[in-house]
Amino acid sequence: TGITPIAYLNKVRLIEASSLIQQGITSIRELCDRCGFNDEHYFMKWFKKHCGCTVKEQFKKSQEYEYNVYKRKTKRDMK
């Protein structure tokens, strides 16, 4: 894979964290617990490095996406 075992494990954990954010988890502590990170600061550092944005920015993007999808569904249902 070209990366260390720890880096690979963290990548898998961060993919899971992104998935959990899409499912509506908005607590950094809960994300850390569910993904196997003990330190929130370490988690946030790796998240930004892997995803290119902070955890809070990802929360916001996720909420905006859900709002836009809901808005489109509502408009379609009204027709």
Image (cartoon, rainbow, N blue to C red):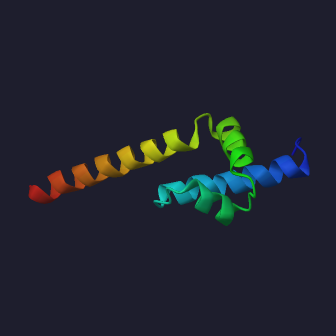
Residue sitting at the far left: 79
Q: Is residue 71 left or right of residue 31?
A: left
Residue sitting at the far bottom: 34
Residue visible at 75% across and 58% down in the picture = 38
Residue visible at 67% across and 64% down in the picture = 33
Q: Quadrant of the C terminus?
A: bottom left
As drawn, 39 above or below 49:
below
Residues 75 and 53: in front is: 53
Count of numbered tags:
0
Q: Residue 23, percent across and down?
A: 48, 61
Q: Residue 4, percent across and down?
A: 90, 46
Residue visible at 65% across and 65% down in the picture = 34
Q: Is residue 8 left or right of residue 51?
A: right
Question: Which of the 4 quarters of the picture holds residue 16?
Answer: bottom right
Question: Which of the 4 quarters of the picture holds residue 31?
Answer: bottom right
Q: Residue 25, percent across and down?
A: 50, 60
Q: Residue 44, percent across and down?
A: 66, 44
Q: Is residue 65 left or right of residue 27?
A: left
As drawn, 12 above or below 49:
below
